[in-house]
Image (cartoon, rainbow, N blue to C red):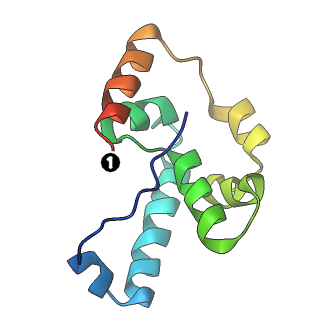
Amino acid sequence: MSCSDDQPMTADPLDSIDDAVAAAAFRRLVRLLRHRSDAANIDLMGLAGFCRNCLGDWIAEAGDLDKESARAIVHGMPTAEWKARFHVAATPEQLARMEESMAKNP
């Protein structure tokens, strides 16, 4: 699964949010995703076009970290452990929804 990392070309009010406020909101999102292990990455991809791994990849890119370290931050544990505990195989329907959703990403 790949995640879009395109940046908007025009001024965006999102850019005016104080970094501390944005960081607090981001941490709340990550903590919610850690708590909601029942929300499968494939379903997140199908609905929103991003998942926990995407967030980790964005952290890696923004912070000059390796992907595994950044994904472990989002998962709250090493990715392999998270997968062993919570990952379930995707159905063909989930994969189709993901593909459709990803096509909408910029």
Q: Could you tell whether 82 is left or right of 58 in the image? A: right
Q: Where is residue 60 in the image (x, y as percent from the top left)?
A: 66, 63
Say few, some or many: other residues with alpha carbon within 10 Å of mark 1 (under 14 / 14 to 19 / 20 or more). Answer: few
Q: In this view, does 99 lie above or below 13?
A: above
The residue at the far top in this view is 92
Judging from the image, what secondary structure is the residue with disc 1 in?
A: loop
Tell me what residue is drawn at x 38 percent, y 40 percent: 49
Tell me what residue is drawn at x 59 percent, y 22 percent: 88
Of 80 and 12, nearer the camera is 12
Of 36 and 70, nearer the camera is 70
How many discs mark residues in the rendered view? 1
The residue where tag 1 is placed is: 106
Q: Position of residue 13 (x, y in %)?
A: 21, 79
Of 19 and 106, nearer the camera is 106
Res 12 → quadrant = bottom left
Please, what is the three-letter code of the amino acid marked with disc 1? Pro
Res 19 → quadrant = bottom left
Q: In this view, does 80 lie above or below 90?
A: below
Q: Could you tell whether 4 is left or right of 55 in the image? A: left
- Quadrant housing the N terminus: top right
Tell me what residue is drawn at x 38 percent, y 16 percent: 96
Tell me what residue is drawn at x 27 percent, y 76 percent: 14
Q: Position of residue 24 (x, y in %)?
A: 44, 79
Q: Where is residue 2 in the image (x, y as percent from the top left)?
A: 53, 39
Q: Is residue 3 above or below residue 61?
A: above
